[in-house]
Amino acid sequence: MKVFVKKFLHSANIDDGEVRVGLLSYSTQVTVEFQLNTYKTKAELFDAIDRVPWTYGATNTADGLKTMHEEMFSEGNGDRPGVPNICVVITDGVSNINHRRTIPEAKQARRKRIHIFAIGIALKDLREINGIASQPASVNAFAIDSFDELEGLNEKISNSVCPGGWADPTMAVMNIMSSRLSLTHF
């Protein structure tokens, strides 16, 4: 996952401040690894991604989504008014903690104009991933069989995020979440 996130962000204009990245990881508990305004350079950001520890536990996507939309996308933590907010959720499990709150938390985030891309790894049931993703799910939800397939999604998602490329100043805020991540989402 760490390699995927760094490759995904490789072309992002982070050093000039056009793109900000925050990261949270979740398993049983949610951990904000860093806020949108924590790192100003790509080198600092990539070092921080490399330091994110792997955490064992259950899948608490609901609290991850809640923390993302209530805490991370706030002006005090680096969100900017008038700039599109994008979240990429990567999970290798269906919620098994607070599972009834997962889709409502995603809907709440979308009501706040946070665009959500959802990536499900080795999931048999895609209803939750499709419910988390912004609509249409056919464009914003991705199902892959293994972590090895993440690399193939880099270009597909970055083209959806920024059709004009990362130099397009309209895409400037991103939050990546991941379940049981050896890294991070995103």
Image (tube, rainbow, N blue to C red):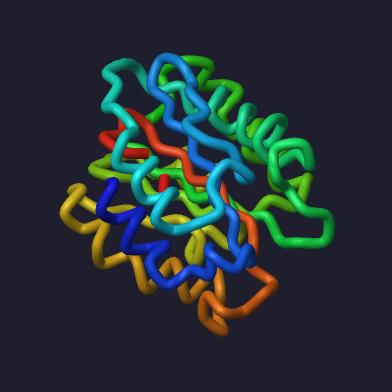
Q: Is residue 1 toward the left or the right of residue 82 in the image?
A: left
At 39% across and 41% down in the image, what residue appears?
48
At 62% across and 79% down in the image, what residue appears?
168
Residue 149 x/y as whole percent: 21, 58
**Quadrant housing residue 185:** top left
At 49% across and 40% down in the image, what residue appears?
23
Residue 33 x/y as whole percent: 47, 31
At 59% across and 38% down in the image, what residue appears?
35
Residue 111 x/y as whole percent: 77, 46
**In the depicted structure, whether residue 19 falls above or below residue 79:** below
**Quadrant housing residue 115:** bottom right
Q: Can the viewer see residue 155?
A: yes
Q: Nearer the viewer, residue 174 or 60?
A: 174
Residue 37 x/y as whole percent: 63, 45
**Quadrant housing residue 144:** bottom left
Q: Can the viewer see residue 133?
A: no
Q: Nearer the viewer, residue 166 or 180?
A: 166
Total numbered badges shown on the rendered structure: 0
